[in-house]
Image (spheres, rainbow, N blue to C red):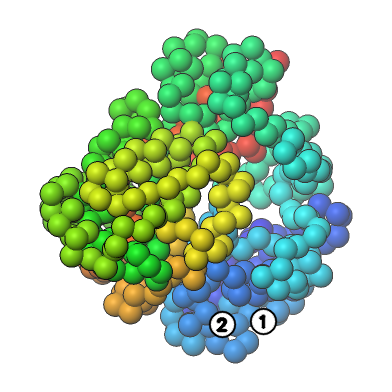
Amino acid sequence: MAESWSLSPDSKTYTFTLRDGLKFADGSPITAQDVVVSFTRWLGGQDGTAGLMREFVADPAFTTVDDKTFAVNLKEPFGAVTDGMARPASGVFVMPARIASVPSSTQISDIIGSSPYKFSKWEQGNQLVLERFDDYVPSGGKADLYAGEQIAYLDQLIWLEIPDEETKIAGLETGEWDLVDGAGLDFYKRVNSNSELTVPLYKPGHRSAVGLIPTHPPFDNLNLRRAVQIGMDYEALMASLGPDELWDLCPASFYCGVPSETDIGADEYYNVNDKERARHLVNESTYTGETVIWLNPTDYATLTPLGIVGKQEMEAIGINVDAPALDWATVVTQLGDPDAFHVWTSWCVHWFCGDPIRSPIYAGNQAFWPKVPKIERLRRQFAQATTFQEKYEIIKQIQLEGYINVQWVEPGNFYSIFPHTADLKNFEVRALPFYVNTWLTR
């Protein structure tokens, strides 16, 4: 939406100017006031960048200069303003001010945005439909994923909710649909050998994770968390997801294969797989044999196997585990109640967990993800650092603190597959499947 932006000499004021002709999907013009109210709603939410940015903004945090121009006002420099706004998910989504004025803790009722496609309908459990928004005004410049010209070549985008993995692949092979949005990794060899299909991989990928709740018994005891950390076989966990070309062991909290990669702390804490020492730590902890509840969905191909193997790994070091048979939708409803469970299976993506500002693991923005004082100080330093080397040194310190505190066990990265028919052209996966600027040849 921004035609241009500038930063004041004291690095405390960002000024943004909107492009001409912008409209919402309901036909109303987009103004700077809509952006300011949307930005304010985002700032009050649980996003990691927003949580830290709240400590840096002035009063008022945002001001409207005119219909096309607004400013972000800071008490002191904060280097993640544009990163926070530009994220492909959980960033600043611009809505009409009347909608965005609803508090961030309240679910919005109208789904109105501005993009090449607009919301049409959502039949829960069945399908989600978007339609081309003909009044969308593309920006200039060569298309470059989320930047540059964005064109909707398709009349509609229809997502069908199909729980069964075999059915998804069979429908793709017979041409009932054009793409499987994140197929089970076990199907990789099958779809990759089909000359009528194309199989993009998402790299640097998703980071598998086993979340422990350090604020509630029994994992409020560091010895018990450490036992899980050093007692699990990380390779067995990752191998459960699928073929070995689709996953890698990776000790870097902020991903491997990127400039910020570091293995600090790995020798002591990563993939130790020392069952004997882990059992000793369990005995030294306050754990008394109570049953640990693990939320692991039964219908999520890139989560389900991890929980099955993880349960066995925990039981091998003396922790009793119950993993009730729940679908993903039910798991999501229970994640908000940390008194009802102790462990859950998860993953994170690079655009969300790729730096200390955004990562929910380090932001402490949930009731059961406590803020670690030293990490909070380091996150602030990261936000204020001006060179890559400064940021890299801070990343190493944060990663080491993460290993020491053991809120998560992160065994490695896996690469989601998005098999589609050869008729679908110019389709890319960069953090998320990218549906604009793609078309069908048939």
- Residue 359 is situated, as x and y percent measured from the top left of the image, at 42, 61
Q: Which residue is mark 2?
A: 73
**Cα distance in 3D space between marks 1 and 2:** 8 Å
Q: Helix or strand or loop: what does disc 2 sit on?
A: strand
| Number of marks | 2
Q: Are marks 1 and 2 in contact (CB under 8 Å)?
A: yes
Relative vertical location of residue 136 with respect to residue 76 in this rendering, above or below: above
Q: Kindly identify the amino acid type of the residue bearing the numbered disc 1.
A: Thr
Q: Quadrant of the N terminus?
A: bottom right
> What residue sits 39% from the left and 55% below the top?
292
> What residue sits 26% from the left and 54% below the top?
228
Image quadrant assignment for residue 59:
bottom right
Q: Helix or strand or loop: what does disc 1 sit on?
A: strand
Q: Nearer the viewer, residue 184 or 440?
A: 184
Q: Kindly identify the amino acid type of the residue bearing the numbered disc 2.
A: Asn
Farthest front residue in view: 289
> What residue sits 61% from the left and 46% below the top?
329
Left-right relation of 348 to 312: right
- Residue 139 is situated, as x and y percent measured from the top left of the image, at 66, 50
Left-right relation of 131 to 277: right
- Residue 338 is situated, as x and y percent measured from the top left of the image, at 49, 64
Mark 1 crowd level (few <14, some 14–19, many ≥20, 10 Å Cα)? some
Mark 2 crowd level (few <14, some 14–19, many ≥20, 10 Å Cα)? many
Tell me which numbered mark, 1 or 2, is placed earlier along the sequence: 1
Q: Nearer the viewer, residue 161 or 40?
A: 161
Q: Which residue is mark 1?
A: 63
- Residue 29 is situated, as x and y percent measured from the top left of the image, at 82, 61
Q: Is residue 278 visible?
A: yes
Relative vertical location of residue 332 with respect to residue 98 in this rendering, above or below: above
